[in-house]
Every structure is written in C-alpha cells, then in structure tokens.
Image: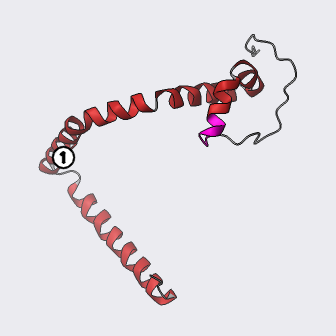
Amino acid sequence: MAFSQEKIEQLIKQYETHRAKERERYQLRKDDPEFIEKNRQRARDHYQKNKEKKRESYFKNKTYILYKNQYNYHKRKDNIAFFIKKYPDRHKYLIESGYLEAFPEPVSLEPVSLAPKTTS
C-alpha cells in the first residue's frame, strides 16, 4: 500500500491534531478525584491480571538481564577489558543476543588485574 506525499502529510497532520486534543483533554481531567481513582483502579486491575506474565518474562530473560547489568557495571567503572577477560562466555552471549557489537570500541586485551580499579 503506497501513499502519495500529500496523503502522508495529511495523515501526519491528522495524528498531530488528535494527539494535541487528547493532551488537552487529559490536562483538564488529570486533577479530578474521580478520574484519578478510576485510573488507579484500572492500573491495579492490569497489574493483577498480568502479574504472572511479568514473572514469566522476568524468568525467561533472567540471564540476559544479569549479564547486561554486569557489563554495564564494568562499563561505568571503565573496566570493560576486565569483564571480557573474566567472563568471556557472558561477553559472547551479549554479542550473540545483539546487545553488543563484536568490538564497538578499541579494547586492550592485555593482561588485566583481577582486582577492581580503585579511584582516588
């Protein structure tokens, strides 16, 4: 389905107008106690209904989240080479999952001390 440039511009304008009206409507209603209570109840119901899905999703991605957090920790400490040296399997997993490129930045793989860096 191909749209002409005019049709695309019309659809974008329509969308922007709709979003502006919705934003204005929300700004008028957001302080209404009845609206607040209904919104909270809707959120509670959604949480109760999808609690098990969230738990399953967490357990399904548990190793990915753990490895990603460890990598980011070492990245913040400016010690990526240490991570690569100590956890080559985790580094490989992150590359295979698409979170990392093979070597996005030059990394020195010279012998690395296993003691974390100390900041003064």
Look at the picture and state if 49 lies above or below 119: below
Closer to us: 6 or 92: 92
**Residue 113 percent across, percent down from the top left:** 81, 13
Closer to us: 45 or 91: 91
From the viewer's perspective, is 98 left or right of 109? left
Which segment did they paint magenta? 94-99
Q: Residue furthest right?
A: 110
**Residue 109 percent across, percent down from the top left:** 84, 26
* Number of on-image labels: 1
| Residue depicted at 25% across the width and 64% down the height | 25
Q: Residues within 10 Å of mark 1 (few under 14, many from 20)?
A: few
Q: Which quadrant holds the N terminus?
A: bottom left
Closer to us: 83 or 38: 83
Look at the picture and state if 77 lies above or below 39: above
| Residue depicted at 67% across the width and 29% down the height | 91
Q: Residue furthest top?
A: 115
| Residue depicted at 61% across the width and 43% down the height | 98
Which element is circle 1 on?
A: helix
Look at the picture and state if 72 lies above or below 101: above
Q: Residue furthest left?
A: 34
From the viewer's perspective, is 44 left or right of 2? left
Amino acid carrying mark 1 in the image = Ile
Q: Is residue 56 magenta?
A: no
> Which residue is labeled 1 in the image?
36
